Image (cartoon, coloured by chain):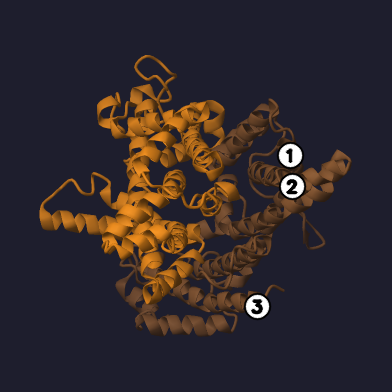
Chain colours: A brown, B orange
Amino acid sequence: MAPGLASYVLRRLAVVPIVLFVVSFATFTLGRFAPSDYVQMQAGSRANPETIERIREERGLNDPVYEQYGRYVWHALQGDFGTSVKPRGVPVSDVIFPRLWVTVQINLLALVFSWLIGIPLGTLAALKRGTWLDPFAIGTFLLFASVPVLVSVPLLQWFFVLKLHLLPSGGWSDASFFGVDLGIFSARAVLPVLVLTLAGVASLARYMRAQVLEVLDQDFVRTAHAKGLRGDVVVVRHVLRNAMLPIVTIFGFELAGLIGGSIFVETLLGIPGMGLLFYESVTARNYDVMMAIVLLGTTIFVFAMLVVDIAYGFIDPRVRLGGAG
Amino acid sequence: MSFLPVPPTDPAMRLREAEELGVADITNPLKVRSRVLRRLLRRPVAVVSISIIVVIYGAGIFAPLIAPHGFSEADFQDRYADPSLSHPLGTDSLGRDLLSRAIWSAQTTVIISVAAVLTGSLILGLTLGLIAGYARGATDYVIMRLAEIFGSVPPILLLLIITATLLNDVQDLGANIEDLTGQHWIVSSGAPSYVLVFGALAMFGWVGLARLIRSQVLALREAPYITAAQAAGASNARIIFWHLLPNIGNLLIVALTLSLGGAAGSEVGLTFLGIGVQAPHPSFGTMISEGVGLSNVREHILLILVPATIVSSLILAFNLLGDQLTDVLSPRHR
């Protein structure tokens, strides 16, 4: 372990509770104390004012912010994140975890595919530098990386669903085999995985190409060639090994964008994952679910960014972890 | 912050790449800048991407002059019309002219992206970064801890919560201001939702740039010419504006280019979800949300094709321009 790394990690970890506090307090306050009344919205406009007052009193919504927030934190620390409004009365964790599992499956599969395709593709593009393939490859990568999911999903639907009649247009299969979800193996999983894979391949290949070019220019590669090593041995043993290191940081960014990146794919295709759940809970003011997702999302994000920063420190010793904040 | 789940187009990541540009040692900033521009204009890809940006932003800026129809001018006799001379791109489900809607949407893109980048990146990010790097000490500590907290929050989740929970209240606030001042254009101009969207974007847009600027300023302020200027009795303002700013200009240009594209994309995403710019004001997000759905895609593909093409080309153009700028500005080519 690099000297100073342990203290750097500790210092970063010390920030995590503060971040969780700030984020949860801000979200809590926004949810409970935005001028538009939360109970009124749940009860509907024709609800009896006395009923509303009774609900407010029962749920302790007339107490000051800090008391309500303190109560929330106290329960959360004991593992009780409240109950969902829709579906009504279900504990939040029972709502979230099946949804999280769907999102994780889709993203994991897309991740595997995009790494399997993106890394060789980027390497190939770098080795073909100077040929007609090169500008073509760069352009294609950047094009696919630039097209927002909002655009690629309808276009892929048009092609695969309407023209080729190959795939169902959306949704999620709830087939299971002895309690094991089989949704990821159904044809409905193809479109979301494809969308995420296309974008992932493009960005990975683009970055990989840049990294390989960087390494190809270095002296030790020239030395390896001069020693008479075969071209493919140089590429695999000298170039790839060095170019792969920075690529690891991409994984951190992908992890950080897990929930946020799923919002659009899942709302467009009607997939019951975390992204759709978050969107539904925000618009339906399902505050306990929303809070829990924000806390979970922030925790994942903080740790993913920590992984990225540590990786940078390992890769480039010039990045001094301890010093600059 | 863009909504694309794609790391290298993620500005946070691109900023890290841009950091490798490092610091230029510029003695005559204006001369260098014009040389950079000339070198940029010799590259066909750069020219194409600049043209795309100029056309789309130009259409947005001059929307009131060039849009053939108003953005909510409906003609129920002429719904889903095919392209014709009077409606070059056809009409939508309410008989509104698609070309005009696209032009007015470009106006929304211009307003939101420029306002978000001006306030978030330029004012907040640049100023806080400069102050932190130049003042050091306690000021630096406070600003950087703040950046650390904002940088640890997944921006999309918070953006969604802020805009969704505050939208009604901001609209009410706008109405109240109307009542108080007697100005009756505020709500109908759509200003409240515009302010909310770019404000929320700016809130999370400053962190990356502030960090980048700070690290550059920390490195620069040890440079001999800064010490020389200080010894010669130059004021802090003179040192910052005359010596520091020109030397971080390269980085700033690349960062702002990437932020503009990111902000434009984020607005489209938020509006698509129904919590960004509010109707009747059009946005590419509204147009996309009106064009998705299998039956629309089957029968009226132009509804999705028009906004999709424009948004994708704009984001692609910003990314290409960012790449080209990085190339032209990188020390290897100097």
Assign a secondary structure to mark 1: helix
In the image, residue B90 sits, relative to residue A37, either above or below, namely above
**Residue at mark 3:** A6
Query: Which one is nearer the viewer's eye here, B313 or A262?
Result: B313
Chain under numbered label 2: A
Q: What residue type is labelled 2?
A: Asp
Query: Which one is nearer the viewer's eye here, A170 or B41?
Result: B41
Instruction: State the residue at coordinates (38%, 54%).
Output: B121
> Do discs 2 and 3 share a chain?
yes
Marks 3, 1: nearer the viewer: 3
Measured as percent of width and height from the top left, residue A314 is found at 68, 64
Image quadrant for the N terminus of chain A? Answer: bottom right
In the image, residue B177 sits, relative to residue B256, either above or below, namely below
Horizontal relation, residue B251 to residue B135: left or right:
right
In the image, residue B62 sits, relative to residue B126, either above or below, namely above
Q: Which of marks 3 and 1 is nearer the N terminus?
A: 3
Instruction: State the residue at coordinates (57%, 71%).
Output: A92
Horizontal relation, residue A188 to residue A309: left or right:
right
**Residue at mark 2:** A219
Can see residue B290? yes
Numbered label attached to residue A121: 1
2 and 3 marks in contact (CB < 8 Å) = no
Marks 1, 2: nearer the viewer: 2
